[in-house]
Amino acid sequence: MMQKWQRTFDTMVFYSAILFTNYSPGTLGWKFYKNRKGKVAFLTRDFICDTETLMKLPPNESSLDELTTAFSPFIPLLTLNGLFWKKRRTIFVHGVRKIDLDQTLDYTIPYKKGDIYWDIYSLVFKTGFKLIFGRECTLEEFNALYPGIVDINKLIKRQSGLANFILRQKLYDKMLTLLNEKNEKFIFNDCKEFDQLEEIHKISIIVEDLLTSLCIQCTDLICHLCLLYSQYSNAFKENLDNCINETLRLFPLTDIWTRKATDKNRGWMASLMLLNRAGWENPDEFISERWNTKNHPPLISWGFDSRSCPASNIGYNLSKQIFTKAFLTKNVWVVPASNFKHDRTFSSGCQVWIGKGNRPLNSKWKYKRKWQKIFQQWWYGKLRLIDQKELW
């Protein structure tokens, strides 16, 4: 009886906090359970509190995130299960192996004061297009494809409430045109299994599994690096790989993983922010030197077990290349807005002032419409959480 009451209490407190605060579920997991080990039992599932417990879960190939409809009408690989998931993953890996990051790419980021998130997002989109199709994206193609990729991001990030299906349809139609071209540089050009897929799955592999995933994850990582670079520039110049790992630890690219219950096991959820901070010394501080040794918990960032991301090396190395060429050059400086809070999801964009040369003596600044952005993200976030029953 006491266990049932405890489960009821823990469930009510955690889910009430999700509904009535502006924190993400993953952030709340860290705030609530940072010193816990094992699991916290909720009424319908468990909350995993540490990486050791996560790694000891029974082997399972089912999706880590199968509750979102933000990608509609596309069918992302991360939501698939069964034999078809394995087949599509094999095809995806075939294409990813042909991506060449050593080719000449333009990594120009504008020097400006304001939100640079979408500047980087469009840069990553154009780069991803060239890596996939082996050529530059034309202006007409960009205008047809890019708004749909942005729309998916805004729904995932709780910056809008409904998908814009007019933009999604333009994205779908233009991608179909591209796939029907005879392009020997296309990464799936020699893949018979890809040719045998249904139209929707061909398009979904390119749109969601590759372009959208690269755009969101690389842009997030680059923006996190940019903000931390403004405080720890010497550490970044000394060992960038250590700084990237520390950035991923503090600001993981995914908020929370969920798995449905099976006949044998209860469903569960896990906060990546909690998994990557619990068990570390000074867990909320940026300390790049901690990666000089292996005496620490594992970094959980790109999935785990059979659901690890097969394109994680591409995402890591592409982000590293862009950041290196755009920021680790002579006399580039970064000043975040004084009223900007560095959060995991960029609910207010990435509000920074980027310049080159001598930094102005008075470089303190604020961005406008802060509270409007915060309220908008809270409102759309709660609507989507309830509408899609994401954590129930």
Image (cartoon, helix red, strand yellow):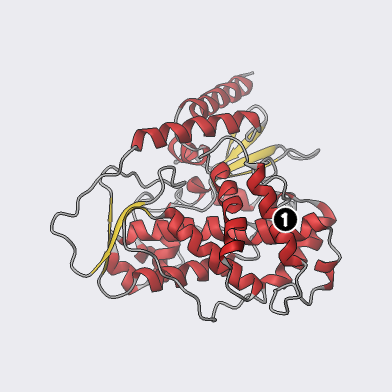
Q: Is residue 300 visible?
A: no
Front residue of this view, candidates 57 and 93: 93
Front residue of this view, candidates 283 and 127: 127
Q: Is residue 155 left or right of residue 288?
A: right
Q: Is residue 59 left or right of residue 256?
A: right
Residue with the most extreme front position: 140
User: For the residue marked with disc 1, what is the amino acid?
Assistant: Asp
Front residue of this view, candidates 303 and 134: 134
Q: Is residue 163 left or right of residue 284?
A: right
Dividing the picture into quadrants, the one containing residue 141 is: bottom right
**For mark 1, does the 10 Å Cα neighbourhood hold few (<14), some (14 to 19), or many (20 or more) residues?**
few
The answer to whether 8 is drawn above or below residue 231 in the figure is above
Q: Is residue 197 left or right of residue 155?
A: right
Dividing the picture into quadrants, the one containing residue 10 is: top right
Q: Which residue is mark 1?
A: 173
Picture coordinates of residue 118, whole percent (x, y): 45, 54
Residue with the most extreme right position: 196
The answer to whether 206 is drawn above or below residue 350 in the figure is below
Picture coordinates of residue 34, whole percent (x, y): 45, 41
Picture coordinates of residue 236, whole percent (x, y): 34, 68
Residue at the image position 78 percent from the left and 57 percent from the top: 201
Residue at the image position 27 percent from the left and 64 percent from the top: 355
Front residue of this view, candidates 23 and 201: 201
